[in-house]
Amino acid sequence: MGWSKNNPNGLIHYTPQLAYRGYTLVTNLNGQESRLIDMEGHICHTWHSSQGIGYSYLLPNGNLLLRTGPAAEETSFLERPEMELLPRGGRTVAGAILELDWDSNVVWEYRYPLLHHDFERLPNGNTLVLTWELIPEEISQRVKGGHDDDESGGMLGDVVREITPAGDVVYEWTSWDHLDFDEDRICFLEGREEWTHQNALNVTHDGDLLVSFRQTDTIGIVDKASGEFTWKWGRGNISHQHHPTMLANGNVLLFDNGPHKRGVTHSRVIEVNPSTNEVAWQYRGDPPISFYSYHISGAERLPNGNTLICEGAPGRIFEVTPVGEIAWEYINPFLGQSGFGVGGSVSGLANSVFRAHRYGNDHPALAGKDLDPDRFANLNRLYA
């Protein structure tokens, strides 16, 4: 894919007989709207939050669960030493996790200024969230790797918390209590403001934690009861990856961004078998450099066996068959604030997408919902 300003956007390609028909949820990174589009690229529904929407997905009840933009200034939190380290470049910090109904009304919220990246609604109604916390100095000084180009002196670490609907913390996993100083080294091209930079939080079929650490090129499965890793993989095989998810066959699908790997810089999507550490399937561009996103991005396996890929930085979302044929392709035509950090733009605007999701026509979240694109006829004439 090129970055020409004259490149067409909206729906680029669609082969109905190959694609998994449904609706795709698209949210601009640092935007204020999530948009549900049909296979023809028409907007069929939108949600809006004045607090920002960095990432969102649909719950089975049709509500939208989302991460907002940064928190409003709160004196008590601004005085905490870790707040001096935020935000850094492309670091994704949020003030709240919100649940919106179909009409964008807030029906649930959890607020904490150090929330970041990912979250997961559990079957019991609780919600897993990710937070940054300052690592004790006696531990951070033993962390290896990275470069220290600033004078902050502090290091952030990742904590997973399980929150009840009332906002009570009923579970906590502190990452640095279960890491190895020799094995979990920071990439030498990355700074030392964070040890791991966890950019994904999912659960396995057994309810354990499936995590992704960008700084150390690592994905892993954490036994939720003990907090210990039962599987850890990636170093030397992947580079600054995003969005691991467990498939029905027990394999793990992920987006391997690839910015600091040796050889030609390119991204790929791979499926790895945790039992053997072998790559069972992969998708790459042809030539490989034609498919690349330095940061963000994701992939999900669809019910028909295809894979929906979000090449996040250029806002490209596409569906590929198991043999790599593109069945559907869409370039996000909407612009949001990008900033000037990692992945930012000179203009301060970009069409970047953190992740995208496809929901089949029979998905319970869409049951009985009005998805007539004619309600957005003016927008669709401009952008479809």
Image (cartoon, grey):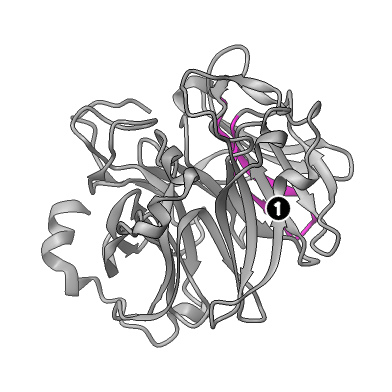
Q: Nearer the viewer, residue 227 or 323?
A: 227
Residues drawn in magenta: 240-258
| Residue located farthest toward the bottom when viewing the structure as drawn | 368
Q: Residue 126 placed where, x, y %?
A: 61, 77
219 on left or right of 307? right
Image quarter hosting the N terminus: top left
Q: Residue 218 placed where, x, y %?
A: 70, 36
Amino acid carrying mark 1 in the image: Thr
* Residue 307 visible to the viewer: no
Image quarter hosting the C terminus: bottom left
Q: Residue at x 63, y 42 (%)?
A: 135
Task: Look at mark 1 in the image and give the residue it sits on.
Answer: 174
- Compared to 269, does 376 lie above or below? below
Q: Residue at x 55, y 81 (%)?
A: 165
The magenta stretch spans residue 78: no
- Compared to 312, does 151 lie above or below? above
The magenta stretch spans residue 251: yes
Q: Nearer the viewer, residue 348 or 113?
A: 113
Q: Quadrant of residue 277?
A: top right
Q: Residue 343 placed where, x, y %?
A: 37, 32
- Compared to 240, does 13 lie above or below? below
Q: Quadrant of residue 23?
A: bottom left
Q: How many marks?
A: 1
- Compared to 335, does 1 lie above or below? above
Q: Residue 118 placed where, x, y %?
A: 53, 56
